[in-house]
Amino acid sequence: MKTAAAEPVPPSILLVEDNPAHAELVLRSFEVCRTDIKIVHLTDGEAALDYLFRRGHYADPHRSPRPRIILLDLRLPRVNGLQVLAEIKSYPDIKQIPVIILTTSSAETDISGAYERHANSYLVKPAEFEELMQLIEALGKYWLDWNSTPTR
C-alpha cells in the first residue's frame, strides 16, 4: 500500500526590515524572481527574536517555522540588527541559520560589527530596483538552491 508523499514545504525567509519602502522592494523582487518561497516580514528586532525563540504570539511552531535564511537590516527599532544577530548566533538551536545582513549602510564599523557577530554575508542594498532584483535573484539562487545547510 502506497502512502501519499508529503507536499514539499517551500523554503521560508525571515525578512526583518522596518522601512516599509525597502521591505516592499525586497518583497516585490522576490515575487518577480522566486515564486516558491514563503516570506515572513517583521518590522523590529524584538519581534524577530520573539519569532525565532517562539515567544508570546509566536509560541506555536506552526506560526513560526524556522526560516532557511534570515535577511536582517541593521537599523531596527526596539532591538537593533547587531543585537539581534548576536542573540541568534549565541543560541544553539538557531545559530546555524544563515543570517544575511541586507542594509543601506556601507560603514566599515557596521560591516566589521556584523562579521564579528558571525554574520554569514553582508549586502548593501542597491538604490535601483533593477539592481536590487538582480541581487535578490543571486541571493535566492545561492542561499536557497546551491548552498547546503544542516537539517533541523
Image (spheres, helix red, strand yellow):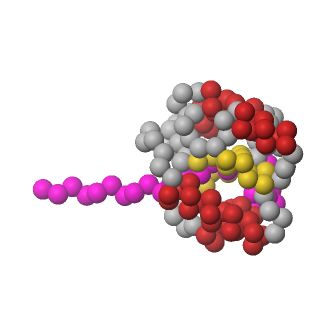
Q: Is residue 43 left or right of residue 30?
A: right
Point out residue 71 in the picture as x, y percentages from the top left corner.
Answer: 67, 49
The answer to whether residue 20 is visible is: yes
Residue 16 shows in the view: no
Could you tell whether 18 is left or right of 59 in the image? right
Image quarter for residue 44?
A: top right
Towards the viewer: 25 or 147: 147
Q: Which residues are magenta?
A: 1-24
The residue sitting at 56% across, 41% down in the picture is 97
**Residue drawn where x is 58% and y is 48% of the image:** 69
Q: Residue at x 50, y 57 (%)?
A: 146
Q: 68 or 149, which lies in front?
A: 149
Residue 50 position, x and y percent, is: 65, 34
Q: Is residue 144 above or below residue 77?
A: below
Q: Could you say where residue 134 lies in the image, as x and y percent from the top left?
A: 68, 68
Point out residue 147 in the picture as x, y percentages from the top left corner. 51, 53
* Looking at the image, residue 36 lies above or below residue 74: below
Q: At x 75% / y 57%, what residue is drawn?
A: 23
Which quadrant is home to the N terminus?
Answer: bottom left
Instruction: Check if residue 49 falls in the magenta segment.
Output: no
Q: Nearer the viewer, residue 119 or 15?
A: 119
Q: Is residue 122 above or below residue 113?
A: below
Classify residue 60 as left or right of residue 16: left
Q: Quadrant of the C terminus?
A: top left
Among the 4 quarters of the image, the one containing residue 81: top right
Hey, which residue is sitting farthest left in the picture?
1
**What is the total number of numbered labels drawn onto the structure image?**
0
